[in-house]
Image (cartoon, coloured by chain):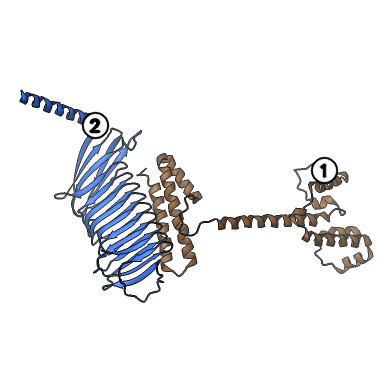
Chain colours: A blue, B brown
Amino acid sequence: MYRKQSFAILAAVMVLVLATFAAAETNRKEFHFKVGRRASISIINQYGPISVKPGPGKHVTVTATLYSDKVEIDQSKSGKRVSINSHLLEGADATTGRVDYEVLVPGDTNVTLRSTTGPLHVERLYGDVILEGNTALVDVRDVSSGHVRIKTLNGAITLTNVSDAHVEITSVGGDVALNAVNGSLVHVNSSSGKIHYDGDFGEAGDYSLTSHSGDIEAIAPSYASIDVVARSVQGKVENDFPLLPEHTSFVTRAGSAFAGTMGKAASSVKLLSFSGKIHLKKR
Amino acid sequence: MTCEEFERVLPELEGGHSIEQEAHLKSCSACSDLVRDLNAISQQARHLQGSEEPSPWVWNSIEVSLRQEGLISQPQPERARTLAPLLGWKLRWMVPLAAAFLIVFGVLLHERGGVQRDLAKQTTPPAGVVTADLVTSQEDEQLLNTVAARTPSMRDAYEANLRSVNAYIRDAKQSADSNPNDEIAQQYLMNAYEQKAMVYEMALDRSLP
């Protein structure tokens, strides 16, 4: 009797789950492309997340989940270039026009993603990464040896463990967080968003963290080797490190500007803000 | 030289007279009185303030006199007429007086406009303070209209972003102008324009709403 009751309950649950799936009206599509070395993939998706990860072999696998029939997928391949576009039909909005993308690509693939809402996620690649979003949250991790270029209007940007890369980030109001990011060039240009850097500034790199009104916080270890200048026209500037003075035309001013070197001054670091606070912190 | 000939060249005289004109002035009391009156009026006109501009009654009475003498009538659009020839020699002295009044009035208007501009400058917030109501330019308005036509819901977001970057550009410009040799001030300005270029690029990108 007890067994019969358990079976009945399980059956009821299964019916409910299946009904839920049926009611969701999602449509799942999968595309496969065979590509060679250094392939390129471009995905334009107005509404919905895009996640790109490395996959096996020399194949690009795109899994798209469509949330209504008011959006369709336009896809094409020309040589090593794959193009995916969420084509919004008449009457589509942020809900009905949503498509979720999960993409597997070879590790050396150059990736270009554009979305209004996002979020955008890229991990464990070593090709070029170009990401654009209006309010999209951007998350890039474990990427190396390529160009990383990110533009958002208000979407927050997080980079984690990005090494030997050429990084350029521009955001009007999105906060930018860089954790263990180093490379030959790391430039962040923000208007009102905050900039947070936590890393050692690598070696022989050009680091520029600039904002108009956003605060800048840079956390570095005591062994960091940097030639640093920091200035805020209106805001407060703090430094936790004993810097060695250097011969420079940069005018230092207690509380609003400092300059100096640490270690062998391997990397150039500029921390500049107009009215935001700047703090170079010791980890 | 007759009086008629003298009156014809009178408007062209600028304090200098030919020998012939000098001789006529010495021999003709009417013309010399006229020249003396004109000189006195033009000197006095320089001292007139804007508040002393003649009342409309003065202009009305002039118009009435002119009509009574038959010197002016209903406007005739097929022929462009200048006022001076219509006035006759008796009232030509009004022309430089009217010109002096107009010049004084124009100067006063310009000065008042300058004061208003100075007041506006004084109320401009200091560098580094983001002004929420920073005015967007005509190009910015066109961009916002383009965005609104495509995706109305995005207009407000783009407008807020434009105000933010315009404040950045304004502060960066002030800094660069104040410190033209400062490399960092120049970098601020480039960064600010880069921000604005990005906003325009994303707004006009037809692949995204």
Question: How would you rate the neighbour count of disc 2 (Cα within 10 Å): few for under 14, some for 14-19, many for 20 or more?
Answer: few
Q: Position of residue A231 (x, y in %)?
A: 39, 65
Question: How would you rate the neighbour count of disc 1 (Cα within 10 Å): few for under 14, some for 14-19, many for 20 or more?
Answer: few
Q: CA distance from mark 2 to mark 1?
A: 86 Å
Q: How many marks?
A: 2
Residue B73: numbered disc: 1
Q: Chain letter for mark 1, please.
A: B
Is residue A188 among what the camera can see?
yes
Do circles 2 and 1 both sit on a common chain?
Answer: no
Q: Chain letter for mark 2, please.
A: A
Q: Quadrant of the N terminus of chain A?
A: top left
Secondary structure beneath dot 1 equals: loop
Q: Is residue A89 above or below residue B168?
A: above
Residue A24: numbered disc: 2
Name the amino acid, label 1. Ser
Task: For marks 2 and 1, give the one nearer the viewer.
Answer: 2
Q: Position of residue A115 (x, y in %)?
A: 31, 45
Q: Nearer the viewer, residue A187 or B203?
A: A187
